[in-house]
Image (cartoon, helix red, strand yellow):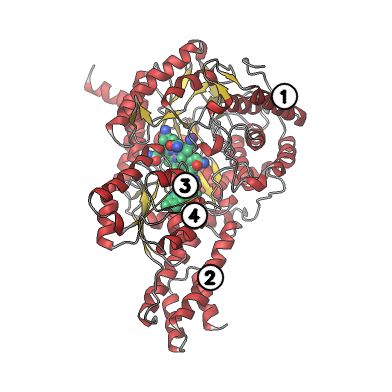
Amino acid sequence: MEKKEIDEQMRERHGKILRSLDKARTGKHITEKEWDTKILPNTLKDVAKEFGLLKTCDIENPVNSDPELADRFFKAGWEAAQRLGFYCPDTESIIRVDLAELESEFKKVPSSFVAGSGEGERTIRARRPSDGHEPIFTAPLSIQMDEELYIPLSQGIVSSKLIDFQEGPSLDTVMGSPLLADTPYETFAGIYEYHLRTEAQRRAGRKGMGNALVSSASTHFGFLSGFNLYEQPQIALCLNPAFMKINYTTFHKCFVANEQGGNIRSESPTMIGGYTGGPETTAIASIATDILQFPVCGAVLPGSPSYDIRYSGNCGRHGVWTQSMATQAIARNSNIILMKTINQVAGPSDDMFFYETIVGMTAASASGQAFTISPRSAGGSKKNHLTPIEAWYNAAVFKGAAGLSLEKANEICREVIPLFEEHLMNPPKGKSFRDLFDIDTLQPIPEYKEQYMKMREFAESLGIPMPGDGVIC
Amino acid sequence: MGILKKIEEAIYDGDEDNILDLVQEALDGGISAERIIAEGGVVALDRLGEDFNNLEVFLPELMMGGDCMKMLIEKVKPFLEAGSSAFSGKVIIGCAKGDLHDIGKSLVATELAVHGFEVIDLGVDVSTNRFIETAEKENADIIAVSALLTTSQYYMEELINRLTDEGKRDKYRIAVGGGPISTEYARKIGADGYSRTANLAVTMAKGLMKMEPTKDFVSVVA
Ligand code: B12
């Protein structure tokens, strides 16, 4: 092949990342503090004011049902994307995307992509609010498990046909050694995770199942060693260091993902109460982040969720309102295949976990999310606090709520939020996999099975048709 | 509006341009440094804290209030009566190596700054060496480490072991926190303090300042 032809191919595959790197290298120098405390919050406030969005948050109606308002949020997000761009902490400069580039990239955003192979192949499609097409469900989030629980837990989770892809859990030891972040242990973890995961999927009869990768990788090392071991196409986990920011770690991963034919998933949450301010400006920041992902790093699966900084979750009123508004804005006005996470804070076997799930997943599915990854039982930060049941329940609500009207979703949220909201600041952490399951038979203890069935009935009674998990029911 | 009220408003608004002039005016008017801190600064910061909990002000405002309070304290320092100190203590804070989760850490840093601690924020991905070098150089009272990743949590124990091996452990109070950290874990690795949230970190840090390193243990969870 001529060098010219090679260059042409390379440009096609990697040109976007090279261009962003060039912009980062040559962009105007700005300190991170100035960006975080001045440029970003002031721009968001200005834009919210210009579009008449301040004080539009209505916590009595957590799921918006005013399409005009959602469209105005989209316009504000588009404006913020143009004015801000992504900040790159490695070069301390801004990667800007001007209007012409934004418009031309926006036209190229794919509205579907494929991952997995054979029986495991799934097409992920953009959805609209109240879309009757089922969204895609991936489980679980990167929750730390004891090494010996990795295979049984994964096998248990993916044995349900409701689970389309696997992302977590993650490890913090590798063959008994500590998995220290940012060291060669991590490089090994990327490889080790591949072997454990493949075995779990084989045992569950899920050959060809697609994955979101690499979970046990705090920096890029685990990704660089692990991603290319899988048969492609897969989903590449190239998270941003923060909303409206991108760094070298993300770019390292993007090059590898592009070369392998992977699909880039990119995001970082906005925090209500954090640098982005209140619910309205936070929603705008999430929309702007999602709009910029494809032009800056070629992500086909963006979705910056919004959490409430007071409790690090998003199933309370402000969290649901902000996230469902940002979702509707994107889903109504673009082809972006939107993913966002629902962050429960209660743990396995506590009723609150199921209530949070009903609220978060119903709002997400009805608002037009195409894809999610869940659960985040106990906020994701308590080791071993995850079982297959939370994953199946999340998937059933997310898929079951497809097609619900926004008014109905709002009604459900209004009914369920009061059942748990007073505990958001100091939530019950629930029980662990060992407490709730027989690890050898992969059966839940009778009390937990009963609670699960009762909670499925509760969701049905609210008007969510719950698809069976194919394992217990 | 009285001068102390004006100072309160300036801190609340993060008005870095005017705070020093206002403090000077108060000093010229014979108001004691202690009253300026308590009735001007602290009152504003308490208001900021409460409004933050109600989502009426946000992290940037809180940080700017903290920065203004630092300016106020530096300005009145020479006028404090002997025996009363300006800052409640000096804290070095950062996220453990490999960890980029800086939201909780920044909130803790801000809460401490807002409540009168002198805070040096080393940011994210901070190596054990850097924590120790900075603590030595700055003569810190507290080293506070945040970890949200269990794979970075290991470095908390490494820090304590290194300080012990180098004979420096009794110079610093070590505070740890972040999602996967618990009272039990903090105790197990031999830290001096733990708190569940940024609000509670202020009570914890004040508790730490009342004790000698390694001699006691402060955990504030509710
Ligand atoms: C935001 C977030 C991110 C953002 C971080 C953005 C940023 N600039 O901070 C991004 C997208 C970059 C990210 C990336 C990753 N993340 Co992350 N992330 C989160 C998330 C959703 C929220 C954390 C947060 O900011 N909370 C808000 C603040 C206010 O709360 P907080 O941090 O807990 O802090 C409070 C207290 O803990 C305490 N505190 C905190 N620090 C300290 C320190 C002291 C001294 C004291 C006293 C108190 C204290 O006070 C704070 C305020 O009250 C959590 C899940 C969750 N809900 O917690 C996952 C989570 C922490 N991430 C997780 C993972 C696995 C990752 C990745 C490895 C994913 C991947 N495979 O790529 C990467 C790692 C990147 C890296 N090298 O650090 C896991 C960690 C699991 C574990 N136990 O190790 C979690 C729990 C999610 C999960 N299980 O699915 N993440």
Q: Amino acid at mark 4?
A: Ala
Q: Residue at x 51, y 28 (%)?
A: A140
Residue, disc 1: A465
Q: Amino acid at mark 2?
A: Ala
Front residue of B35 and A83: B35
Q: Mark 2 to mark 4: distance in Å?
A: 18 Å
Q: Amino acid at mark 3?
A: Thr
Q: Amino acid at mark 1?
A: Pro
Front residue of B199 and A460: B199
Label annotation for residue A83: none
Label annotation for residue B198: 4
Residue, disc 3: B183
Q: In this image, A117 relative to A355: left or right?
A: left
Q: Mark 1 to mark 3: distance in Å?
A: 42 Å
Say if mark 2 contacts mark 1, CB within 8 Å: no
Check disc 2 and report its element: helix, strand or loop. helix
Q: Chain of mark 1?
A: A
Looking at the image, which residue sits at the far bottom?
B29
Say if mark 1 contacts mark 4, CB within 8 Å: no
Q: Earlier in the sequence, mark 4 or mark 3?
A: 3
Say if mark 1 contacts mark 3, CB within 8 Å: no
Q: Chain of mark 3?
A: B
Q: Quadrant of residue A184?
A: top left
Q: Position of residue A305 (x, y in %)?
A: 53, 40
Q: How many marks?
A: 4
Say if mark 2 contacts mark 4, CB within 8 Å: no
Q: Which image quadrant: the C terminus of chain A?
A: top right
